[in-house]
């Protein structure tokens, strides 16, 4: 893809629907040939208090990441006041095949699944099925009477790696949604080896029901509510959705969220008919550049059967268009295009800090955590331009989004790279979006 092509796509969206219609008419293409525009209202940047020239800086920086071979390709989107002012593609969807990145490329969004799963559970909250402080053992009895692991004493070493004691309180729904339940995880904690042995999807045909039962047999890393610790709690959220609703988790999301919001390209497992839009996954190569980690083929674990494990913690595939529609619903107070998913007060509750001053080691100082979202508490401590009350999260394959109610702003960045923490690309999109605000 040439620089000219990349800039032309961005200009169409920066200048709005009028220019797009002119370009389409001149080319002879029908609007249906441009599915990336479906459901995405656009505006000129200066119509929503942003500078077109400053928005153009996003193009330059993202192109530079591709030119340096830091990433193979990127899709970036910025919207304000419900209007998309920047929606651009850069580089390759599949470099090995010579396939250019497109606006409708489908990405592994990993932990950006967590807000979706959390919304699903809160829809059931709104129907009166539970309160946030209810113990999860009401639906998953295996999580009753949990034990907490602590280091073995000198005398016990050799007989056991840890000792256990009764948890000080039950795990609640609120603990699950805020990552304060103390559950074992793959990142850290005394029970990490035990978690690795029962990790999800180790066997074909695994389910969130079976994984939940295995997880309930392990002791916790700490007493519920004692601190924040990232992990697979949102898989258990998905299982509770199944138990309360009586529906498989994937069907609940499809019928209650994806179909109503017209999220037509969001799936747990990609249909074979959409493989030509699936992005390749890369890793940094020794000596520089990129190496292929997983090709966009039917052999991908996000495509091949069996389709039985529906991970609320990180299983979804999606596009920039679809994910924008989901987060615009949240920014609108739970409604989009006349479809209400949540009530306004529930959205407000989800995007408040629920964990007090517990530190969030994964993102650093300045942040709290709500129900499925990190929440900006102190932009100075965070060293980022987000407004207080903004909410966001990331994905393990270098994807991110944020929602800023104060500025009425949404940003989305999608690429496919792991590991990625040596890059500032996610933070750079936020910096570049905020510096373009001029009203």
Image (cartoon, rainbow, N blue to C red):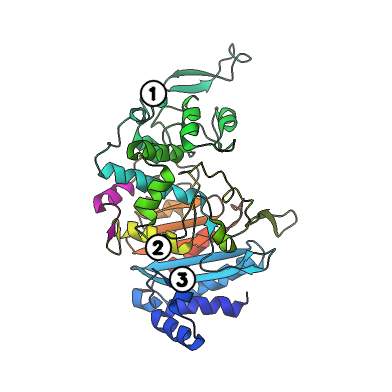
Identify the secondary structure beneath mark 1: loop
Does 348 lie within the magenta span? yes
Location of residue 125 in the rendering, given as x and y in whole percent from the top left corner: 28, 42
Q: Quarter of the image containing the N terminus?
A: bottom right
Q: Nearer the viewer, residue 193 or 190?
A: 193
Q: Residues within 10 Å of mark 3 (few under 14, many from 20)?
A: few
Residue at image position (35%, 35%) is: 173
Q: Sequence order check: which comes first, mark 3 or mark 1? A: 3
Q: Residues within 10 Å of mark 2 (few under 14, many from 20)?
A: many
Q: Quadrant of residue 386?
A: bottom left
Instruction: Give the CA separation, mark 3 to mark 2.
Output: 20 Å
Res. 122 visible in picture: yes
Above/below status of 113 relative to 288: above
Give the residue at mark 3. Answer: 35
Q: Please state which of the two labelled residues, at mark 3 or mark 2, is closer to the viewer.
A: 3
Res. 366 visible in picture: no
Identify the secondary structure beneath mark 3: helix
Does 5 lie within the magenta span? no
Q: Which residues are magenta?
A: 339-350
Identify the secondary structure beneath mark 2: strand
Check the image and name the residue furthest to the bottom: 26
Q: Nearer the viewer, residue 368 or 199?
A: 199
Instruction: Give the CA separation, mark 1 to mark 2.
Output: 40 Å
Give the residue at mark 1. Answer: 144
Above/below status of 254 relative to 150: below
Check the image and name the residue furthest to the right: 287
Q: Sequence order check: which comes first, mark 1 or mark 2? A: 1
């Amino acid at each position: 893809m040439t620089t000219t092509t990349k800039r032309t796509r961005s200009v169409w969206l920066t200048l709005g629907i009028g220019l797009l219609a002119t370009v389409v008419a001149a080319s002879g293409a029908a609007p249906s040939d441009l599915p990336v525009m479906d459901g995405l209202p656009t505006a000129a940047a200066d119509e929503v208090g942003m500078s077109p020239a400053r928005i153009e800086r996003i193009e330059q920086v993202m192109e530079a990441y591709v030119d340096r071979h830091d990433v193979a390709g990127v899709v970036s989107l910025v919207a304000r006041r419900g209007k998309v002012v920047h929606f651009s593609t850069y580089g390759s969807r599949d470099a090995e095949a010579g396939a250019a990145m497109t606006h409708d490329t489908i990405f592994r969004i990993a932990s950006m699944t967590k807000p979706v799963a959390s919304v699903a559970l809160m829809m059931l909250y709104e129907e009166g099925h539970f309160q946030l402080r209810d113990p999860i053992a009401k639906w998953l009895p295996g999580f009753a009477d949990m034990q907490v692991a602590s280091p073995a004493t000198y005398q016990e070493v050799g007989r056991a790696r840890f000792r256990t004691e009764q948890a000080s309180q039950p795990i609640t729904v609120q603990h699950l949604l805020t990552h304060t339940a103390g559950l074992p995880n793959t990142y850290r904690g005394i029970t990490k080896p035990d978690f690795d042995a029962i990790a999800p999807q180790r066997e074909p045909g695994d389910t969130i029901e079976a994984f939940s039962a295995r997880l309930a047999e392990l002791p916790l890393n700490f007493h519920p509510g004692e601190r924040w610790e990232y992990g697979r709690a949102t898989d258990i959220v998905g299982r509770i959705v199944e138990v309360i609703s009586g529906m498989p988790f994937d069907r609940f999301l499809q019928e209650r969220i994806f179909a109503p919001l017209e999220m037509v390209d969001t799936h747990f497992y990609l249909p074979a008919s959409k493989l030509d839009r699936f992005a390749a996954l890369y890793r940094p190569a020794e000596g520089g550049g990129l190496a292929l980690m997983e090709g966009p083929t039917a052999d991908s674990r996000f495509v091949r059967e069996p389709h039985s494990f529906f991970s609320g913690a990180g299983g979804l595939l999606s596009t920039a268009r679809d994910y924008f529609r989901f987060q615009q619903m949240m920014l609108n107070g739970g409604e989009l295009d006349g479809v209400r998913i949540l009530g306004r007060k529930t959205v407000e509750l989800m995007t408040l800090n629920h964990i007090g001053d517990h530190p969030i080691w994964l993102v650093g100082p300045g942040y709290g955590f709500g129900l499925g979202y990190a929440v900006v508490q102190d932009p100075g401590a965070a060293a980022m331009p987000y407004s207080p009350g903004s909410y966001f999260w990331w994905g393990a394959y270098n994807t991110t989004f944020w929602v800023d109610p104060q500025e009425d702003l949404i940003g989305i960045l999608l690429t496919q790279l792991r590991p990625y923490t040596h890059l500032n690309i996610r933070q750079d999109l936020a910096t570049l979006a905020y510096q373009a605000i001029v009203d």
